[in-house]
Image: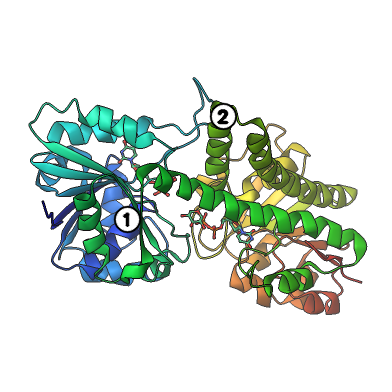
Amino acid sequence: MKRRILNIACIGAGYVGGPTMAVIADRCPHVSVTVIDLNEARIAAWNSDTLPVYEPGLDEVIRRTRGRNLRFIPQREGAAAVAAADAVFISVNTPTKTQGAGAGKASDLGYVEACARYIAEHALGHTIVIEKSTMPVRAADTIKRILATSPRVGTFDVLSNPEFLAEGTAIRDLEKPDRVLIGGETPAAVDALAEVYAHWVPDQAILRTGLWSAELSKLAANAFLAQRVSSINAISALCEVTGAQVEEVAKVLGTDTRIGPKFLKASVGFGGSCFKKDLLSLVYLCEFYGLTEPAAYWQSVQDLNEWQKRRFAQMAATHAKKQGGVVAVLGLAFKKNTNDFRESPAIDICNYLLAAGVRLRLQDERVDPHMFGAVLVDDHKAGFDFFCEAAEAVRGADAILVLTEWDQYATLDWRKLSTVAAPGVMIFDGRTVVDPVAASAAGLPVFTVGIGAAK
Ligand code: UDX
Ligand code: UDX
């Protein structure tokens, strides 16, 4: 039977659910979209002028859609929206398990299971349930099992439609995706979801696969991207000791069409809510199926990332401790153009420095200082303070670490900053964003990841 999706509900108003539903509502004015979340403060923020997610372009999309065919409501008011929905997206977080089988590696499906129970309880008629959150392979089995317990006479299809948006470019990625992936077993359900995306995505960019391929493709895509970052970061360390320049090497690699130019930027390590979680989930899946060598291979991508962060922190701590023991950290977000700092390299590096007894002066143009302060561990009472301006943060600093590639760090006035930093200050650029010529002209030595110390 041909199905049409005219009513959508989405559980989870986070970095993924919010922007994704906003773009669907924008491109499909005939579809009514309701986003539901347990967190009422978050829903209130989505209904205010200060959205809970910072994404370039998001404000305009929300302005066009909110109150028209897009609304945000708390979960306690969500039953009717689920009952009316032709399709319900599950877009809640799937953190790494902290206890039970697979603790430390496997993804925790607790929230997803709770969503499936909520849908089972309230859905009416035929409902297409769509995995938007990244799931381990065969998670759809779990969802189907729970839906089968529905007290109502409703029927269900389960699809996997993983998101490929990157934070900071989420709206662009959603409006012009490389591809949309829909995995499912029932062609009518797959077609119904494809018809929604077809309002703005060309048909050849809508890929249809089986459920398990779709679930695994998402994990594999993130693992491949993370693997490229770890590969270039492994090369970055070799560049620093041999005199090779990582940007030159990356350019050469990237012009080989078989390799391609993206995801070859050396850094202080990858962060974000997905790469580590998805790598560990893949490692766990391999181990679960007795695939020891593939498990070790993907684990090594994560291990290299930890090493890259640690060696950078060690270098900065050693330099700062030879002097007054004060470090300025510029950039806390896991990448530019987002307020998100989940798994940001800045967290581990700051905690390493605090444990080494270094006092921190922190600055980021978007990250909430209270929230970031809450993830720092300062058992030694080394101390940390937040500043609005980079020029304030570097005051009295013995080392300046640049950990996010915010545009403003490319044009810092190093001559002015050199007058307020401590004598003997050194810049440690973990993002190849600082202008080494300007810094050197101001008499400041710079260590750049993948390049080493400026001569
Ligand atoms: C998350 C995962 O991190 C990612 O792997 C997955 O692909 C999509 O979901 P994100 O949107 O960034 O991504 O997560 P987050 O910003 O934490 O948003 C999840 C939202 O779900 C939160 O607002 C949370 O309150 C809500 N939630 C969680 C519910 O509404 N109900 C629940 O049962 C659990
Ligand atoms: C990622 C995937 O790109 C996206 O498709 C998926 O849906 C969610 O996970 P995201 O984590 O938002 O998106 O950002 P991404 O641009 O992938 O960056 C991840 C981390 O890798 C960041 O810390 C970034 O700074 C780092 N990175 C990226 C590098 O260090 N070098 C690069 O060349 C690229």
**Quadrant housing residue 433:** bottom right
At x 82% / y 56%, what residue is drawn? 237
Residue marked by disc 2: 104
- Return the x and y of residue 49 as percentages of the image width and height: 30, 63
At x 50% / y 21%, what residue is drawn? 101
Viewer-proximal residue among 62 and 109:
109
> Mark 2 vs mark 1: which is more N-terminal?
1
Q: Which mark is residue 18?
A: 1
- In the displayed structure, 439 sits above or below 180; it is below
Mark 1 and ligand 1: say if the CB distance to the nearest ligand atom is below 8 Å.
Answer: yes
Type of the residue with mark 2:
Gly
Q: Residues within 10 Å of mark 2 (few under 14, many from 20)?
A: some
Q: Is residue 35 visible?
A: no
Q: Is residue 360 left or right of residue 450?
A: left
- Return the x and y of residue 325 as percentages of the image width and height: 81, 48
Q: Quadrant of ligand 1?
A: top left
At x 13% / y 35%, what residue is drawn? 122
- Return the x and y of residue 134 as percentages of the image width and height: 42, 45
Q: Is residue 89 left or right of residue 291?
A: left
Q: Nearer the viewer, mark 2 or mark 1?
A: 2
**Quadrant housing residue 5:** bottom left
Quadrant containing the C terminus is bottom right
Task: Identify the secondary structure beneath mark 1.
Answer: helix
Viewer-proximal residue among 313 and 204:
204
Q: Is residue 312 left or right of residue 122?
A: right
Type of the residue with mark 1:
Gly
- Return the x and y of residue 180 as percentages of the image width and height: 37, 60
Contact check, label 2 and label 1, Cβ < 8 Å: no
Q: Residues within 10 Å of mark 1 (few under 14, many from 20)?
A: many
At x 28% / y 58%, what residue is drawn? 21
Q: How is the image coloured?
A: rainbow
- In the displayed structure, 436 sits above or below 104; it is below
